[in-house]
């Protein structure tokens, strides 16, 4: 099986004074504004790093749901936050790290099993495999 998903970006102008928009095949994002101020100055609009964070959080959480099911467990609730670090170095900007933080309520799970399954999901999630950044995970059973 092979599934292809797409998104597109439009940009007009220079880096700091320009503006752009992002759209996704599904229509969830349709001409969503993004630009320098949203990315580097905290102004309204989205940015590539938060979209990567959303993709990673969603992918990891779904992967863990699959792995839990294979272990005979079902999550009552899982809340994952992904924090993408963007930093400027001598060769330009890079994303050196992503921190995943998971709070999960999983009836019948002990912490050792939970940690093992969460680590397996982190390593096996397709977005984790795609990214070359150091990906860390804090998993808490609540």
Image (cartoon, helix red, strand yellow):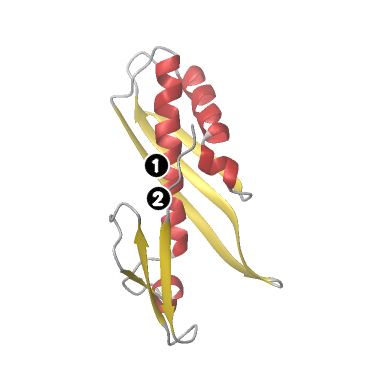
**Please, is residue 141 above or below residue 82 in the view?**
above
Side (left or right) of 85 relative to 24: right
Q: Residue furthest front?
A: 1
Q: Position of residue 37 (x, y in %)?
A: 40, 78
Mark 2, Cα crowd under 10 Å, few <14 / some 14-19 / many 20+, is some
Q: Horizontal and vertical percent for residue 97?
A: 58, 52
Q: Residue at x 40, y 18 (%)?
A: 69
Q: Which residue is mark 1?
A: 58
Residues at marks 2 and 1, CA–CA distance in whole angstroms: 6 Å
Instruction: State the residue lying farthest toward the right.
Output: 90
Label 2 sits on residue? 54
Residue at disc 1, secondary structure: helix
CB of mark 2 within 8 Å of CB of mark 1? Answer: yes
Between residue 99 and residue 68, name the one nearer to us: 68
Residue 115 coordinates in the image, percent (x, y): 51, 25
| Residue 96 quadrant | bottom right
| Helix, strand or loop status at disc 2 | helix
The residue carrying pointer 1 sits among few (fewer than 14), some (14 to 19) or many (20 or more) residues within 10 Å by Cα, namely some
The quadrant in which the C terminus is found is top left
Q: Residue 68, position in %: x, y?
A: 42, 20
């Amino acid at each position: 099986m092979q599934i292809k998903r797409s998104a597109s970006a439009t940009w007009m102008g220079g880096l700091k004074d320009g503006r752009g928009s992002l759209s996704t095949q599904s229509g969830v994002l349709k001409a969503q504004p993004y630009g320098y101020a949203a990315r580097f100055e905290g102004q309204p609009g989205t940015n590539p790093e938060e979209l990567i964070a959303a993709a990673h959080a969603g992918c990891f959480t779904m992967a863990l749901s699959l792995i839990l099911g294979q272990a005979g467990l079902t999550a009552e609730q899982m809340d994952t936050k992904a924090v993408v670090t963007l930093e400027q170095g001598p060769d330009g900007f890079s994303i050196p790290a992503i921190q995943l933080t998971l709070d999960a309520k999983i009836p019948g799970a002990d912490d050792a099993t939970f940690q093992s399954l969460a680590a397996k999901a982190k390593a096996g999630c397709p977005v984790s495999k795609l990214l070359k950044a150091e990906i860390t995970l804090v998993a808490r059973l609540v």
